[in-house]
Image: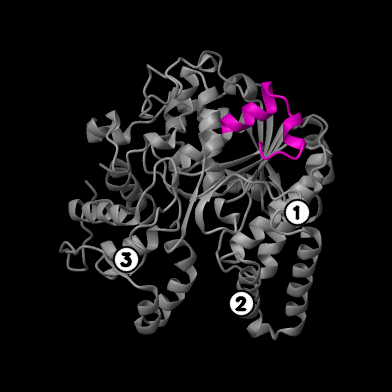
Amino acid sequence: MFFRLDQSSKKDSSALHLCAYNGKNSGVLEKGLVSLNGALNSKVHEGIGIIDFFSGKKILITGATGFLAKVLVEKILRTIPEVDKIFLLIKARDKEAAMERLMNEIVGTELFKCLREKHGTSYERFVLAKLVPVVGNMRETNLGIKEDVANLIEKEVDVIINSAATTTFDERFDVALDINTRGAARIVNFAKKCKKLKLYVHVSTAYASRRSEGKIIEESFGKGHYVANSAGMIEAEIKLASEMIESSKENERDRNLKDLGMSRAQNYGWPNTYAFTKAMGEMVVEDTKGQLPVIILRPSIIESTLNEPFPGWIEGNRMMDPVMLLYGKGKLPGFFLSPEIALDVVPADIVVNSTLAAIAKHGGKESKLEDNNGSDDHVYQITSSVANPLITRHLLDLVYQHFNLNPCFDREGNPVQISAFKFFDFELIRRKSIEYFKYMANLYQPYTFFHGRFDNNKMAKLWECLSEEERKEFGFDVSSIDWKDYIVRKHFHGVRKHVMKETALK
């Protein structure tokens, strides 16, 4: 059968509301952890020292108010309270406004309810002793950080995690270049001034690869891979964007810059502006890192949490969700999709746990020489389409099951009846659909007819290095995900509760 059955799917549904203080709801087997040859892996006993590495460390995180960064911050505070400080780069007019965003958009969110329950009345005192809001902007020199604050961070920070990005597929070309590409250059320059820095972590995307067929391995963009003169290419693209700004009328500028980004991306073989500018961001890191210890993480489509701190937490409509919600409301009978492709989805807590493990490995016990000798050992794809593929026809069957079990309601309060999801041919959609769906069809086509699968071999090797306790606390084995349990019982419950604010779900 396609779907795996693990112990988590047999638990009472009330388990969905439990806070995972110790990772025991991870669905990972606690015994019999053996390597592929049947012998107990000796590294399982030793582990890589995730908790030891982060204890007493100071971390700088960009994109701090974003979806992934919040899950990361919550996980660190909940499982490694011995961390010293987490500096959070927040775009704000001043430090008071940054503190307000910290309290409203991070500390006060439902994501942190387990920490809130754990610490009780001392919750705010605890988090404010650990979290330091830093006024900054990825689009400014030195990240827009005031000199005295920058000097402090440069003296003290041990790890920098850059998760800042604009993820809009057809973003204005100048904006995407400034954040995803030039922003990478700015933060590498900042990292080089940090005297104690043990590791710079660059969060990219699996779709930064130009390939769209076959197995896509974890290759670096270094040494002229894909583009021989990446620096020259990036300069040329920045110049094109600047010229477009100067030549466009104000009322046409947004549309022209969006069209320019998409056309330039497709000219080089990338599907959209987002993937293109993220790829160029990686090129910048590879070209300018010098002796800076670096790892590059490439998650695929990040969706709601699998288990931690509780199942189904999500913020904002992610990639696959808007279409599925329209289907569940009876407003869309189907969509343009190839029924046999593997949609590469990874729950947010899987991404966070693998990130922490990779940081501990490369910033801690392991030698960092291998990361700067031209190898690809510092590039990790956090993906599922090879290890545990979610085939679209199976996904849509599960979505159908979810909305049959928990139907949406129309304005009169009647349950919406849906039929099996229809797979439309891309050309048919383009000919017959209204303009909005033509736009959606063009935007999503590189993903909904994507025939590549992202290998996660290095993440699998990293998993083998964890101790049994680390596997329980920082589980990221994508092969253990029960997609039926996740899609039917967790993910769309989370989307409807946390994004759509529905209250009548079972």
Residue at horizontal 62 percent and vertical 47 percent from the top = 163
> What span is in magenta?
356-377
How many labels, in total? Answer: 3
Give SS at disc 1. loop
Discs 3/2, front: 2
Q: Find disc 1 in the rendering and name its residue.
A: 224
Mark 3 residue crowding within 10 angstroms, few (<14) / some (14–19) / many (20+): few
Give me the C-alpha separation between circle 1 and circle 3. 43 Å
Magenta stretch: includes residue 317: no
In the orientation shown, which residue stands out farthest toward the front? 37
Would you say 86 lies left or right of 207 here? right
Percent x, y for residue 185?
77, 52
Q: Find disc 3 in the rendering and name its residue.
A: 326
Front-lying residue, 188 or 100: 188
Q: Amino acid at mark 1?
A: Gly
Q: Amino acid at mark 3?
A: Leu
Give me the C-alpha separation between circle 3 and circle 2. 27 Å
Q: Find disc 2 in the rendering and name its residue.
A: 259
Give SS at disc 3. helix
Say if 217 sits above or below 46 in the image.
below
